[in-house]
Amino acid sequence: MNEIPAMFGLIVSGRIVQTDFQPLTPTNLVSTIPDAENINHVVVFLTGLTPFPMDMGGLVFFGWPDETTGSSNWQLLGYISNDKPSAIFKVSNLKKTSSLGAGCQNPFALHISKNAQIGISVEPLTSVQQQVSQIASTPDGSTATNFRDFCTKMLENFMNYASSFSQSQTQMVSNPSEQYVPLSTLQSWYNNFNRRLEKNPYFWRT
């Protein structure tokens, strides 16, 4: 694994490209990002010099500095692989707490730094895919947040559209072939769906 440091590149929005990943172990590497408070997005990519070994990929972690302890709270962002050689991640909204999903392992837990960092853990693709699938159901994950926001907007649009056709009983014209649903029923469905969505954006998968 001696060629791993040359494999990866990092772009912090508004800054020059970094390729200075330092190995902590034969399969775990980090690159330090100064002035973490000013970061909005990062791009992690394969430089093209060396591909991943067969059936291997890289989990991408973001280490957010804790000013009181000097340690980094690591959060799993996603992954890169030979089939997905680059990925952009929004990090401006990440909390200063570790927010790994259940089943996600943190290979950088003991690494201390006052700066933000990007960590890459080279692991079998089966492990990569399993751990990445966990952050999809994490409420603080950006993917889950974006999906929840989309569903909320969609629900609001549907309710506004349906409400625009509402009529009181005195306004209704008798039509034996037409069926009607009380607006209160739709409102109840909306409230229940939205409540479940807040708890788990992917509850509908079960």
Image (cartoon, grey):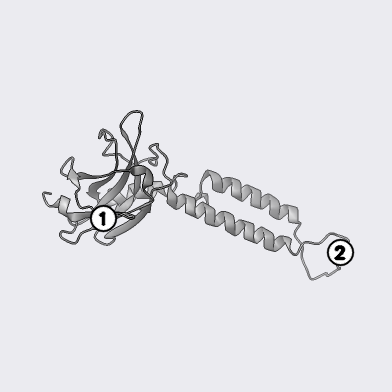
Residue 44, image x, y percentages: 28, 54
Of residue 42 and residue 202, the one placed in the foreground of this image is 42
Is 82 situated left or right of 180 in this image? left
Disc 1 secondary structure class: loop
Q: Which residue is mark 1?
A: 16
The quadrant holding residue 29 is: top left
Quote the CA–CA distance across marks 1 and 2: 66 Å
Residue 59, image x, y percentages: 28, 49
Residue type, numbered disc 1: Ile
Is 200 situated left or right of 187 in this image? left
Residue 64, image x, y percentages: 34, 40
Residue 102, image x, y percentages: 39, 40
Tell me the mark number nearer the camera, choosing from 1 and 2: 1
The quadrant holding residue 103 is: top left
The quadrant holding residue 71 is: top left
Disc 2 secondary structure class: loop
Relative height, residue 23 to residue 57 (above, below): above
Q: Which residue is mark 2?
A: 171
Pointer 1 with pointer 2, Cβ within 8 A: no
Relative height, residue 63 to residue 88 (above, below): above
- Residue furthest to the right in view is 170
| Mark toward the start of the polypeptide (1 vs 2) | 1
Relative height, residue 60 to residue 46 (above, below): above
Q: Is residue 27 visible?
A: no
